[in-house]
């Protein structure tokens, strides 16, 4: 996918299913079976951690549209498990390279 360099280190603001604005830090973008996925952490609008809230990694499918990106929830359990495994393997590979 193109333009990931522009996305990385960005704070992304989107509306949830209730229409409330949520802010996320884009942690990583990776590919599984020719589909793009994003790892996100919920943050304040200025990118600071939310006080009193434990950081939780959120994995979502990333859909490229004409000039923007859409994040979709991964509803299929098998797909979600594949994405989790791929993300964990990517993290393990990065840790191995640093040693």
Image (cartoon, grey):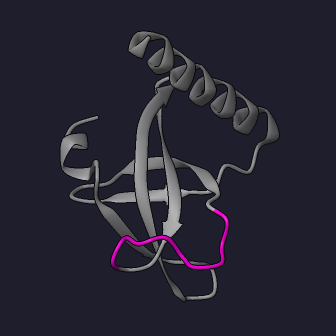
Q: Position of residue 60 (x, y in %)?
A: 56, 50
Q: Residue at x 61, y 52 (%)?
A: 57
Q: Residue at x 63, y 87 (%)?
A: 18
Q: Residue furthest right?
A: 77
Question: Which segment did they paint magenta?
Answer: 46-54
Q: Residue at x 38, y 80 (%)?
A: 45
Which residue is more in the foreground, 90 or 52?
52
Give the prevailing secondary structure in the magenta stretch: loop
Q: Position of residue 8 (x, y in %)?
A: 28, 48
Relative to 29, is 68 above or below? Answer: below
Which residue is more in the foreground, 7 or 96?
96
Q: Assess whether residue 50 is covered by the magenta stretch.
A: yes
Q: Assess whether residue 14 is covered by the magenta stretch.
A: no
Q: How many marks?
A: 0
Q: Residue at x 71, y 34 (%)?
A: 79
Q: Position of residue 81 (x, y in %)?
A: 75, 32
51 lies left or right of 46: right
Q: Position of residue 25 (x, y in %)?
A: 41, 60
Pick the quarter of the image with the C terminus: top left
């Amino acid at each position: 996918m193109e333009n990931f360099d522009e996305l990385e280190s960005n704070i992304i603001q989107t509306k949830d299913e209730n229409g409330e604005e949520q802010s996320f830090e884009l942690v990583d973008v990776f590919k599984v079976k020719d589909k793009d996925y994003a790892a996100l952490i919920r943050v304040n609008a200025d990118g600071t951690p939310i006080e009193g809230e434990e950081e939780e990694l959120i994995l979502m499918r990333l859909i490229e549209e004409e000039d923007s990106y859409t994040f979709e929830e991964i509803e299929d359990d098998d797909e979600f498990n594949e994405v989790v495994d791929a993300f964990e393997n990517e993290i393990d590979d990065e840790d191995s390279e640093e040693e």
